[in-house]
Every structure is written in C-alpha cells, then in structure tokens.
Amino acid sequence: MSRSRRTDPPASELRGRVPATAASESLAAPLAAALGVGAAAGGLARLLSAVLPEPWGTLANTSALWGLVPFVASLAVRAPRSASILVGITALVAMVATWVLLAPQPVTPRELLLWGVVGVGAGALCGLAGELARRDSPWARRLAVTIMAGLVVGEGLYGILLIGGPQWWFEAAVGVALALALGRTGRDRMLGLAGALLAAGALYAAYLFYDAIAAG
C-alpha cells in the first residue's frame, strides 16, 4: 500500500502568510479602540450640545474640536505608523455616525455626504498628527502641534472675526494651550506655537470655504 507524501508549502509562501496575519491582528485592537472612542465622543457631543447654555453649546459641534478625537485616539492607542491614518479615520467617522444617529431631526443626504468626506479627510490628517506627536524627532512633534493647534486656533479666529461670542475666544485659547502642552521643551513650544499661528491664518480661508459649501 502506497502512502501519499505530504507536501508542505514553500518557505516563501509561509513567510508571506505570517506577516499578513500578524498585521491584521495587530491592527484589530487599535481600530476597535478607535471605534469605541469615536462613538463615545459622538454621544458626548450630542449630550453637551443639548445641555450647555448658549452660546457654549456651539463648541460641541465644531469641526476643529472634533478633530481632537482622532488625534487623541491615534496618540493613545499607539497604532503602527502605517495604521495611524486608518485609526484617525475610524475614530472620526464613528463620531460623525453616532452624532447623526442621535440627531433629533433627520440629516439631509447632502449634509451626510459633506460630513462623511470631511470625516475621512480630517480623520486621516489628525490621525497622522497623533502618530507624529509620538515620534522622537522634534520636527515631527512640532509638525503635529502645527496641525492640531493650527486647526483649533484657526476655527477660533474664524468665529471671533465673523460670528462673535466668548466661546470662540475660549476655543482659540484651547488651541494655544494645546500647542504649549504638546511641546516637550521650551523651543518645541515656541516653534510649535509659531507654526500653529501661521497655520491658523491659512486655515481661516479653509473654514470660509467649508461654511460656503455647507450653506450653499
């Protein structure tokens, strides 16, 4: 009686399988954490928008402050460098989806499309900033400060100049505090804050453009 000979896959094939499996497993936990953080943030934003007195309730629904969610998610879960963008997208899209599901009135398809596009784009950018903030390179950390503090200060500047109200001054102050808190040295803080203020001026036009689309 002949015995069939077992043929094992080539070593090159095994080498190709193991990294893919390990990568999917290592990514599952960060994405699950980002999903939970985003959903919780969306629920909290809805609650704050309902209970905070005017004009402070506005801060629960501002694009820049929402950007802190994917940033913190990417910074906290310590995903691999290549996965930080996906973690940021997951967190912000989950936040937007929760906000929409808890909306007291139906959201229009146009609003849903706009928020979805912004959620993916801003989530990717802020997720990348979270990964940059973890690096040892001072310039990577300063770029992270420029991105995140610039977003927040820029929106605060927009509100101060075009809308008015103490809430926008508070948001601008949060952006400045963020730049100072993220810097590890005095030089980091000085250069990060300078970059954030420059970015805020440039982003002012971007916020104008976004509101024009949203109101159109």
Image: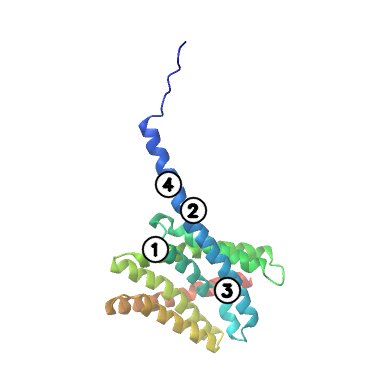
Q: Amino acid at mark 3?
A: Asp
Work out whether residue 15 or residue 115 is closer to the camera in this orientation and state it. Answer: 15
Badge 3, how many Cα within 10 Å: few under 14, some, many 20+?
few
| N-term-proximal mark, 1 vs 3 | 1
Q: Amino acid at mark 4?
A: Ala
Image mark for residue 170? none
What residue is shown with label 4? 22
SS for dot 3: helix
What residue is shown with label 1? 131
Distance from Cα at disc 4 to Cα at disc 3: 43 Å
| N-term-proximal mark, 4 vs 3 | 4
Up/down of 160 relative to 143, above or below: below
| Labels 2 & 1 near each other (Cβ < 8 A) | no
What residue is shown with label 2? 28
Q: Specify the quadrant that holds the C terminus.
A: bottom right
| N-term-proximal mark, 2 vs 3 | 2
Q: Amino acid at mark 2?
A: Ala
Q: Position of residue 188 (x, y in %)?
A: 30, 75
| N-term-proximal mark, 4 vs 1 | 4
Image mark for residue 211? 3
| N-term-proximal mark, 4 vs 2 | 4
Q: Position of residue 40 (x, y in %)?
A: 57, 68
- Residue in view at x 57 percent, y 73 percent: 211
Distance from Cα at disc 4 to Cα at disc 1: 20 Å
Q: Is residue 170 left or right of residue 11?
A: right
Work out whether residue 127 or residue 213 is closer to the camera in this orientation and state it. Answer: 127
Q: Is residue 132 left or right of residue 59?
A: left
SS for dot 2: helix
